[in-house]
Structure formats: structure tokens, C-alpha cells
Amino acid sequence: MLSAEANKDVLYQASQDAEAVVVEGMMGLFDGKDGATETGSSAEIAKLLQLPVVLVLDAGKSARSIAAVVLGFELFDATLPLAGIILNRVASEPHFKMLETAILSACRTPILGWLPREPSISISERHLGLRTAEEFDDCDANNKQIDALAALAESHLKLDHLLRLECGLHLKSAAIGCPETGKASIRVGVARDRAFSFYYEDNLDLLRHHGAEIIPFSPMLDSSLPADLDALYLGGGYPELYAQQLSANLSMHTSIRHFVASRRPVYAECGGMIYLAQHLATSDGKPHAMAGVLPFTMEMTNKLVQFGYVTVELAQNCLLGPRGTVIRGHSFHYSRIVNAPTIATNYRVLYSISGRQEDEGYSIENVIASYIHLHFRAAPIIAQHFVEAARKLKARQTVPA
């Protein structure tokens, strides 16, 4: 998704003033853009950033065969800095001893511990992944789960060994530079609640860097938008799970439509685009009225519609940048637009897995809405352009008559 230097920037930024950095791998260690190379995989990122790899293996139904799995990882890419193994969902201490004996008999990678099969620490899944932190109501229960995980880590993992692992890069000061100063602050309302929580935190950091103040609000619970906003950012999430609450909040619908009518910038991704539609048909077929900004009806599907990395080229000058700007993102959704009317588009899109191309990035008034989750650091001009668009409009609207 990002260039080598941009990936290094992410690590530099995150490591400032930190005592430890944990980089979570996505999918399998070698799973990336395609089946022939490591491009886009956790393995590629680990080598790029010179990070020691701790391989977590599900050992729930394994015995001596676990050694063949570990040996396969060791041999598959001998240049990978494989620093240790943690075995997950182990049935018991005797089960771990059997697994340990098998691995030590054939493999060189040290075992850094194991975790038992423990229902109290499991996190439930759904169609787009794990339950999100925003969905946990019971703080006490959540804290107990965290405490249980911590206790298991202390008793079952070699924490001292883990904390001695080091990144091979010199983690110098972040290359992004100092935040912009001397310009008017721009208040960007960001939807954040149970229904909207899918954001690249980097995107928000880059908006802040260019002078944005991030103002969170809840389309589910707040009766209106926060006061004096200059722009809106509606990210992805699970609007389909909270369609009834979102539909019932009519005063928020009105507030958002008034905001759009003012021609202030609005950027919506995936779940945010669904929320701006006229209606959403949930998996039970029931229609729910949404904010009514875009002339779309959306419906949930029973399978992934698009999945994978995406390259976006801006087809014209727009809210996010000049024509020809290229940015990367990803697509991952279980819904589709039904009977889409003709509407202006700003993106030329190439899907990396399917090779499919299409026009996307729907536009009405000063709104851009898309299924694609863009990573602003892939083309930082995007964040700058968005903030500047809001700043220019604010300046025009505050000039005395």
C-alpha cells in the first residue's frame, strides 16, 4: 500500500517516545498482493523495517506435525529474521511439552511461550473481522479480559526475551517534519462510535499535521453535528449492524444535509458512504432510511464484493487533489449499490487481485464518497488538499460583505 520510505516514516512516527513497539502482522506471514511474491506481505515489511518476527501458530489440533510447519516457515525464506515462536490455543501443559519436543528436534527457532485454549480471552468475529473496541459496553468485563490476558502472558511467555528483541533500523526523528503553523485551524468532524470506527490513524495524524483539529461525533447518539465544523470525514465501520439506530436519528440526518448544502467538504469511505445513501437494505431485507445525501440505495450481500489493494488515480481536480494524483488504498465490503443512477465520479480505480477497472469516487455538491479506504500517507497531498479546501471555503465565508 505504501512506499518503502512511507512505511519507514510510519515506524519512525510510532516509535517516538516509546519504550517498545509491537507491529501486528496481517493475515499469514507470506500472504500479500499475489501468490508468486512476498509483495505486500508481513514478511516483506519485516525485512524492509528490519523487524524480528515472532510467529504465532495455532497449535490447537497439532502434535508432531507442528515441527513440519515451523520448519517450512524457516526454509521458505531463509533471509527472514525469524526470532521466535509462540504457540496458541494449546490444550494443556503436557500438550505443550509434546509440541516443544517436536519443534526442538527439527527446528532452530526458539519457542518463546504458549497460550492455553481459554474461552475468557477470546474475541468474537463477524463478517468484517473482530468485534471492535467501541462495541464493548462493560468496562469491568473488558478490563477483566485484559487482566486475564496479561496474567497468561506473564505466566506462559518469555517476556524478558521478547522485550530484548530489537529493530535493526536506527529510529531517527520522523521525516514528516514539523506541523504547519501560522494558518487558521480547521475543525474536521470525524464520525466515531460503534457504527464508525475503521480509520487509518495515520490519516488523522496527517490531517492534524496540516492544521486540522479532529472533532469526534456519533451519528448514532448525537442529535446534531458539533458546532462550527469546517469539514466532515465519515469512515468505515458497521452501519448495517446499527441501521435501526442510525435510521431513527432524524435530527442528525437533517444536520448532515444542511452541512452538505453549505458546500463544506465531506469525505466518506465505505460505511460512511452507506450512511450518506438514501436507504440501506440489511441482510434480512428490511430497508432503513439513511442520511439521504447520495441518490443511492445500498444492500448487504452474503459474500465479499471487492477485496484487496486498490490503486486510485484522480480523474479530475477535486476535493482530494489535482487530476492525475495516484494513491493507494484497500477495498473490503459485503454490500453493493443497487440501481445506481448516473452521478459524477472522481476516481479511476484498479483492483489489484481481480484486475478490474472502474470509475468510482462518487461526487455530489462538495462530497466525495467511495467504497475504497484510502491511506493518505501513500500520497500525503491528499490530506493537505482536503484541509486547504476547507480552509479556503472558510476564508470566503468569513469575509465581511
Image: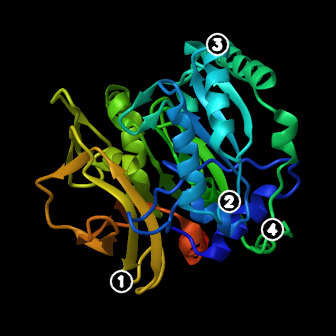
At label 1, which amino acid type do we have?
Gln
Residue indicated by mark 3: 141
For marks 2 and 3, the one nearer the N-term is 3
At label 3, which amino acid type do we have?
Ala
Contact? badges 2 and 4 (CB < 8 Å): no
At label 2, which amino acid type do we have?
Asp
Whether residue 229 is situated above or below residue 365 in the rendered picture: above
For marks 3 and 1, the one nearer the N-term is 3
The residues tagged by marks 2 and 3 sit, at their Cα atoms, a distance apart of 31 Å
Whether residue 372 is situated above or below residue 325 in the rendered picture: above
Tag 1 secondary structure: loop
The residues tagged by marks 1 and 2 sit, at their Cα atoms, a distance apart of 26 Å
For marks 4 and 1, the one nearer the N-term is 4
Could you say which is closer to the camera, residue 397 or residue 170?
170
Residue 45's mark?
Answer: none
The residues tagged by marks 3 and 4 sit, at their Cα atoms, a distance apart of 39 Å
Tag 4 secondary structure: loop
Which of pointers 3 and 1 indicates the residue nearer the eye?
Answer: 3
Residue indicated by mark 1: 316
